[in-house]
Image: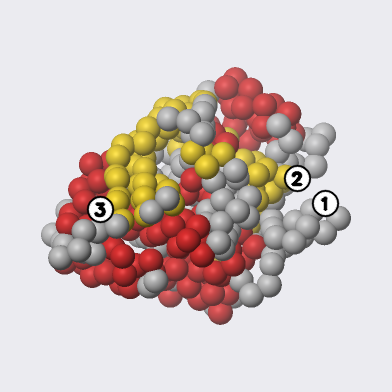
Amino acid sequence: MSKSKIKINVRPFNLKLEYPFGISRGSMDSAKNVLITITYGDVTAYGESAPSSYYGESQDSVINFIQSFLKYKSPEEYVTNIQKLKDDLNNFSSSLNPLGLSYAAKVGLEIAFWDLIGKINNRSLYQYLFYEDPFVVLNDDYENIPQTSFTVGLDNLLVIEEKVQKAIKAGHRILKIKLGKGEEADINILETVHKATKNLNCILRVDANGGWNLETTKKMLDILPKYKVELLEQPLPKGQAYLLSEIYNSSPIPIFVDEDCMVGNDIESVLGKVHGINIKLMKAGSVIEAVNMIKLARGYNLKVMLGCMIESSCSISAAAHLAPMADYVDLDGHLLLANDPFSGLMFVNNKVIPSLEPGLGVQMSDN
Ligand SMILES: [Mg+2]
């Protein structure tokens, strides 16, 4: 048997946040992610997994999953057939006792292979996804790429105000406000953000992370337009999207689901209940799956938001290559870090733009 030319290293990748990140379910001050490094000849390629305890994943579960998967595989064949990698990962995942999910593990490895394949063939990830170059610069702008929102997590009102001021100073004009603490607390947060942004042309979006019930959702939908909130994300807990069919036609702003829609197979179940879905690589478990989801959502006239977890610009870059396909972009995970170990991903006019170098277009500069 010939010795494998591909070497794959999987290790913990801890990322410190600038501020603790609070959502309706809890708060974190660092992301315990996983870094996948592939070396093949003189090429080094990277992938990243951001496991979510909400979906039953952890740093250990991701590392175990990838190491077990690779034990009986010869990864050379994936260099010329990445679809086979996706299929093998799915088969392996469904053969396991499903104690935890493995979406972040699967996509982390796939991202590393996309980076490797791109570097070997001297092509950017987006060149595998688009016939024409959507990143062509017109009038110093990337016309087809929506600006990203910047997330303001739950915190006390003073810190929220400080975070909003800082975001505005950094040039952000679309803010995603985390709510879901209850009507009164949430209105106080909206007031605070509104006060700090009212003289600027800011767009506000609200993500309740499943923190409301239907009654609160109805009340908040009356209030949100007064604060110029343009969309509402995941008002109800996961599994209750069916209740939204009652307000689907009358809602003054579009409603999106995030937690309720992970993979393509989830899309049909939210039709007639919401106006859009938040697609994330870490939930889809695959770049290929995420692209398919975008196409499927389009076919159903659903709006597409491209989101992320707390991630370095390694895996955020993979998503950034998909951004021209999205209506709304929420790729700010790396912007919330105290220190991003990767560089190369650009931030131009509030748009997250990949460097267009081969593969993901990032270099590891630290860690
Ligand atoms: Mg969300």
Residue 27 visible to the viewer: no
Depicted 100 relative to depicted 58: above or below: below
Q: Identify the amino acid type marked 2.
A: Asn
Seen from the viewer's position, the closer of residues 196 and 18 is: 18
Quadrant, the C terminus: top left
Query: Residue 235: percent from the left, percent from the top?
Result: 48, 51
Q: Which label sits on residue 66?
A: 3
Q: Identify the amino acid type marked 3.
A: Ile
- Tags 2 and 1 touching, CB below 8 Å: yes
Q: Measure how far apart labels 2 and 1 are at the Cα level.
A: 9 Å
What residue is shown at x 44% (from left), y 68% (from top)? 288
Choose the circle earlier in sequence order: 3 or 1: 3
Q: Nearer the viewer, mark 2 or mark 3?
A: 3
Seen from the viewer's position, the closer of residues 55 and 318 is: 318
Choose top left, top right, bottom left or bottom right for residue 295.
bottom right
Q: Which label sits on residue 186?
A: none
Q: Nearer the viewer, mark 2 or mark 1?
A: 1
Choose the circle earlier in sequence order: 2 or 1: 1
Horizontally, is 341 left or right of 172 in the view?
left
Q: Which residue is mark 2?
A: 349
Q: Which residue is mark 1?
A: 140
Choose the circle earlier in sequence order: 2 or 3: 3
Depicted 74 relative to depicted 158: above or below: below
What residue is shown at x 56% (from left), y 63% (from top)? 123
Q: How is the image coloured?
A: secondary structure
Q: Measure how far apart labels 2 and 3 are at the Cα level.
A: 37 Å
Characterize the local packing of mark 3: few (<14), some (14-19) or many (20 or more) Cα atoms within 10 angstroms. many
Characterize the local packing of mark 1: few (<14), some (14-19) or many (20 or more) Cα atoms within 10 angstroms. few
Q: Identify the amino acid type marked 1.
A: Asp
Horizontally, is 176 left or right of 348 in the view?
left
